[in-house]
Image (cartoon, grey):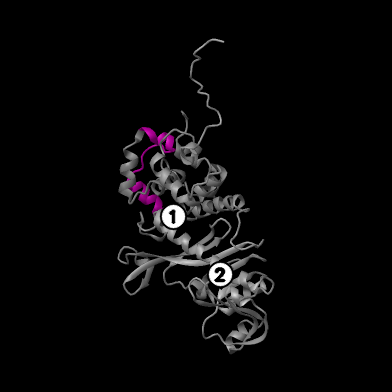
Amino acid sequence: MNSGSTVFAQLMAHASRFALDRCIRRYDGNRGVRRFSCRDQFLAMAFAQLTYRESLRDIEACLGAIPERLYHLGLQAPPARNTLSVANEKRDWRIYADFAQILIHEARRLYASEPLSVDLEQTVYALDSTTIELCLSLFPWAHFQEDHGAVKLHTLLDLRGNLPVNIWISTGKVHDVRILDVLTPEPGSIYVMDRGYLDFQRLHRLQQARAVFVTRAKKNLACRRLYSRAVDRTTGLFCDQTVVLTGAASRQSYPEKLRRVRFRDPETGKAYTFLTNDFTVPALTIARLYKSRWQVEIFFKWIKQHLRLKAFYGRSPNAVKTQIWIAISVYVLVAIVKKRLGLERDLYTLLQILSVCLFEKVPLQQALAGAGYTPESSDIPNQLPLFDL
């Protein structure tokens, strides 16, 4: 049995303390702080995510019930509810956003060899957003509709490992397509999007940046076919065409050729029309690329169900963004541990195990791997010999 670090301390050891301190110094996060540092805030909020705490009072009560274990958690003392509330309200959320990006960079390196659903060497991203509803009377800054509040998580997901590369947090009123204005496209990468991002002026910027996009066409798309390629209709393909836009505004916004692929899903019978600027890959690959976009929908469903993103601990924009970025950090950190330790279990199972064994002093791999785990060495260092040799 491990007589030293707790499971929580071993988990946090996979997140570079030096990197977090660098992010804190970048935004002068500990200025005027005497006891409850930004690192303490991160640990307390990570504890809340891993143990499914619902409120600041909940966090205070649970940490206050185990004062003798807080040293092993990394905290000097249990934080008061008001102390944690002020920290979430005042300390710059960009500290935790930058730290999450460092973890994401490490996770992408570990998952770089993960297979895609399509046989491609390029990086494939899915771009989409999800809405988190808020009470407008408690979050008046997050006005969405007449009597509703909401924030949007615009997410760029790397489909090789299903890792969020970047997240832009906005109010619910911000249209999805505006994220293309702040997106920095990677030449050669593929961006898969739904019809909400169909803006030809913005798509032309991706084309000029030598990035590839795959999206769905609208029913009223005005275009003219230049020529067609042969397709195998038994696969569900209808046509594979090269087209140009004929609408006055759309032709001016996107003056170059586009590829239009029509496909009927044999499972649902629903027909789709795709637009892309890639003329090299097979038409069926275009359809499969768009189908892989559903991974981002699964990601949104997963984080809403298994991370604390429905009940927020603070009401200001800074507190909401802080909680979201720390939640993403926990998600990515568990993904890093899963890969580094070679664990076969899915992230949901790992989070469930962590929620009940954070203060156990057992090796992290033993706690997460399950009953089939055998330690590398079965020697017990404090066991006396039974027989003299």
**What secondary structure is marked by label 2?**
helix
Say whether residue 156 is left or right of residue 149: right
Near-viewer residue (122 or 371): 371
Q: Which quadrant would the C terminus be assigned to in this image?
A: top right
What is the magenta range?
68-90
Instruction: Provide the residue designation for mark 2.
Output: 290
* Local SS, label 1: helix
The picture quadrant where one finds residue 140 is: bottom left
Residue drawn at (38%, 71%) of the image: 144
Which amino acid is tagged 1? Thr
Above or below, 374 against 220 in this view is above
Q: Which residue is mark 1?
A: 322
x and y, in percent, of residue 229 in the image = 68, 80
Q: Mark 2 or mark 1: which comes first in sequence?
A: 2
Instruction: Name the residue at 55% across, 28% down.
Output: 377
**Mark 2 → mark 1, Cα distance in angstroms:** 32 Å
- How far across and down, in percent of the image, does residue 168 sit? 50, 63
Residue type of the residue flagged with mark 2: Tyr
Is residue 212 or residue 385 the one in the foreground? 385
Residue under the point 50% across and 49% down: 28
Within 10 Å of disc 1 (Cα), the crowding (few <14, some 14-19, many 20+) is many
Q: Position of residue 297 (x, y in %)?
A: 47, 64
Residue 249: percent from the left, percent from the top?
Answer: 58, 87
> Which one is in front, 229 or 39?
229
Q: Residues within 10 Å of mark 2 (few under 14, many from 20)?
A: some
Whether the magenta-drawn stretch holds residue 45 is answered as: no
